[in-house]
Image (tube, coloured by chain):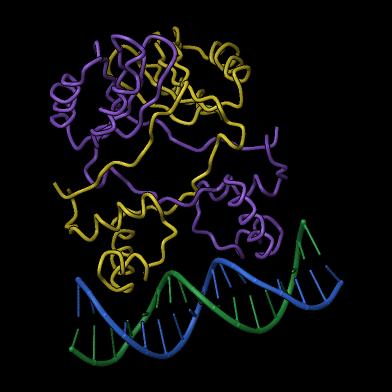
Chain colours: A purple, B yellow, C blue, D green
Amino acid sequence: MKFNLDKLDFQIIQEMMENAEISYADLGKKLFVSGGTIHVRIKKLQEFGIVKGTKLNVDLKSLGYDVIAFIGIYLEKSSLYDSVAKELRKIPQIVRLNYTTGNYSMFAEIVCKDIQQLRFVLHDELQKIKGIERTETFISLDESFSRNVLVSSE
Amino acid sequence: MKFNLDKLDFQIIQEMMENAEISYADLGKKLFVSGGTIHVRIKKLQEFGIVKGTKLNVDLKSLGYDVIAFIGIYLEKSSLYDSVAKELRKIPQIVRLNYTTGNYSMFAEIVCKDIQQLRFVLHDELQKIKGIERTETFISLDESFSRNVLVSSE
DNA sequence: ATTGAAAGAGTCTCAGT
DNA sequence: ACTGAGACTCTTTCAAT
């Protein structure tokens, strides 16, 4: 760890990773300090670059984005990573891309409105990209859980 | 889509998925409506359950959580899904679990402080869980990008 | 449905401890 | 380093359109 964070800092991060709407006064009550102290700590965490902002928590399912899938990508040559990544970034349904060890060269996550859209991306868009040897798709039938990591000083 | 959302609703969602800190007045300026209108729309989106709250955007790398990996899990029987999911949930480093089609029965994402911790989870904790036949691990060497889906009415 | 203004709540600063 | 109070800003409500 690069910074000297204490238990209170971690408690604030943990709490606000789940719910960033809580007021400083209320969070202070919960953690037995004043709202002013919460404020000072959050300012410090922002200065350190640990807290980068807040994001809206949106229920994608209710917006019709039902289909989540993971794609393992085999490249012809691993040197093609950057150029393939650049092409994959152009596909808005692909929300995440990691360069990985193991079977696959890259690992992508894709969010679609329906199976037809997923098929279109897999069949039409990915096939056009030079350097992709083949792909394996894992469609999520159920998200068992999704949560934040447990932060602490150890 | 279950709801009647217009362009403005989607613009608000898109903007605030990236930055939920912006004030209603400022967001209104950006989208050429009053702050009051932004407020009404967000209230509506909350009532619909589309907006579920806000989350702190934390830089896990700077907190020392450097190691992200994906784990493909083979089960002995797919009926063991629930009991294995229950055990995996007890491991705090596992932040996400999906039940998937394809090669693997389940797909997990894990966040660790170092390779030693990852090895401990993979070798000691996962091996203890009854019903897991074997696992394949893909360590992320680089996150090329991670972003929100592009929402719209179509 | 949108607006603008007033009331209420929260953030931010700072002097005191 | 924490606190509490005052200044300031944002959210929330509401009457008018």
Q: Position of residue A147 (x, y in %)?
A: 47, 37
B107 over A24 or under it: above or below: above
Q: Nearer the viewer, residue A99 or A87?
A: A87
* Residue nearest the observer in this picture, A15 or A71: A71
Between residue B154 and residue B72, name the one nearer to us: B154
Q: Position of residue D14 (x, y in %)?
A: 33, 85
Establish if D5 lies above or below B19: below
| Residue A67 placement (x, y as % from top left) | 24, 33
Q: Looking at the rendering, which quadrant does residue B96 occupy?
A: top left
Residue B82 x/y as whole percent: 41, 24
Observer-nearest residue: A14 or A144?
A14
Q: Report the residue at 26% width, 19% height from top.
A: A137
The total number of labels drawn is: 0
The part of the image, by quadrant, that contains residue B25 is bottom left
Q: Quadrant of residue B114?
A: top right
Instruction: Identify the residue shown where x is 53% and y is 43%.
Output: B58
Residue for point 42% across, 18% down: A100
Which residue sits at x=51%, y=23%?
B87
- In this image, A103 relative to B66: left or right? left
